[in-house]
Image (tube, grey):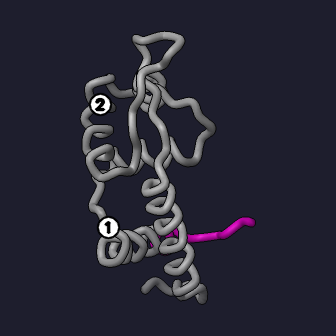
Amino acid sequence: MSIDLRPAQALGLWHAATLSHLAFVGPDLTLRQMVILLHIYLKPPPHTVRGLASRLGVTKPVITRALDSMGNLGLVRRVRDDRDRRNVIIKRTVEGALFVERLGDTIIREARALPWDGGVA
């Protein structure tokens, strides 16, 4: 499915979806945490700290700090790789999957509410 949005409409959708997300979905993740979380849930596993750092162009400590916060919220969990104990594998959780699904539902709901006549809300 293709959707043609002007930049102002796309920004309006992002604005509406993030406002709605904060009000009804929570928790409040940083943009970096959100990108990491979406990568974990939208791209096929396995995901490692090293792999995420490389893919997202940040250091391993940056990924680790984000995972600490998201782990405390129950959105992801980390386990040592049994084959290579140096690797840390990031696992999805039921709570994290529900969070991402609610976020997707929020974006769909807000997209449907956009004024598609060319105006910007």
Quadrant of the rendered structure where residue 95 is?
bottom left
- Residue 3 part of the magenta segment: yes
Residue that mark 2 sits on: 64
Q: Amino acid at mark 2?
A: Thr
Q: Amino acid at mark 1?
A: Gly
Determine whether 111 is above or below 117 in the image.
above
Residue that mark 1 sits on: 26
Say which element carries label 2: helix
Q: Residue at x 51, y 30 (%)?
A: 47
Say which element carries label 1: loop
Image position of 72 (left or right of 81): left
Q: Residue at x 42, y 12 (%)?
A: 85
Mark 1–mark 2 distance (CA, rounded to whole Å): 21 Å
Mark 2 neighbour class, 10 Å CA radius: few under 14, some 14 to 19, many 20 or more:
some
Boundaries of the magenta span: 1-10
Q: Residue at x 50, y 86 (%)?
A: 119
Image position of 113 (left or right of 74): right
Q: Percent from the top left, x then y, of residue 12?
A: 43, 75
Q: Magenta region, mostly helix, strand or loop? A: loop
Decide which of tag 1 and tag 2 comes sooner along the chain. 1
Determine whether 82 is above or below 89 in the image.
above
Residue contact at pointers 1 and 2, CB within 8 angstroms: no
Q: Quadrant of the N terminus?
A: bottom right
